[in-house]
Image (spheres, rainbow, N blue to C red):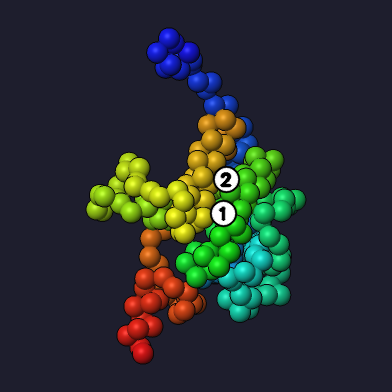
Amino acid sequence: MSANGTDNSTSKKPPSPSPLRFSKFFQSNMRILVTGGAGFIGSHLVDKLMENEKNEVIVVDNYFTGTKDNLKKWIGHPRFELIRHDVTEPLLIEVDQIYHLACPASPIFYKYNPVKTIKTNVIGTLNMLGLAKRVGARILLTSTSEVYGDPLEHPQTESYWGNVNPIGVRSCYDEGKRVAETLMFDYHRQHGIEIRIARIFNTYGPRMNIDDGRVVSNFIAQALR
């Protein structure tokens, strides 16, 4: 630390992942974990993953916002497993890839239980990163446009940091996702975990909840009424 308070220390180079970790990302038969897989977007991802006849897909969901009906076509399939589990609790399982989608994304749900929302984002992501580290899995986090807060730049580029309110009623979701992204990059830098982050904006389509309070669903509901 210099006299003016600047940290001049040299950061440690992140560890190099094992070559075995990279090799299994390209194998045809994979065990894939999808958290929040009973939800709107998660269930469509499961459909796509199940198209590969060599994939085994494990869905973890607590049904806070998701439903078994979204996955009924796969229940009982030999390559599919559905586990009722809350990601804020550790999960001991062997997988090759993790798609971490678990989190209430509707304003109605995350305003109803803000503590649960931020715990799912932070503790749930920590648990999934711990699992990825233990088994050498690649992990993808679904994030959100809400990490930009009330943006002053339109459209937002990935280099834009945002304009955020850390104590607003929506912050349990917005800040939770920002922390989750931070954790992803910290695990990548410190432990060499292979990560991906997808910031999803307003999505609509089959299986969406018409009353979930989001922009597109509100627009459609008001038009129909």
Residue that carries the numbered disc 2 in the rendered image: 138
Residue found 32% across the figure and 41% down from its top: 159
Q: CA distance from mark 1 to mark 2?
A: 23 Å
Quadrant housing the C terminus: bottom left
Residue 11 position within the rendered picture, expressed as x and y whole percent measured from the top left? 50, 20
Residue found 51% across the figure and 65% down from its top: 111
Residue nearest the viewer, comparing 63 with 25 = 63
Q: Give above or below for 12 relative to 91.
A: above
Marks 1,2: beta carbons within 8 A: no
Q: Nearer the viewer, mark 1 or mark 2?
A: 1
- Amino acid found under the numbered disc labelled 1: Ile
- Amino acid found under the numbered disc labelled 2: Arg
Which image quarter: residue 202?
A: bottom left
* Secondary structure type for disc 1: helix
Judge from the rendering whether residue 119 lies leftward or rightward of residue 216; answer left or right. right
Residue that carries the numbered disc 1 in the rendered image: 118
Give the mark, 1 or 2, whose residue is nearer the N terminus.
1
Residue 75 position within the rendered picture, expressed as x and y whole percent measured from the top left? 68, 75
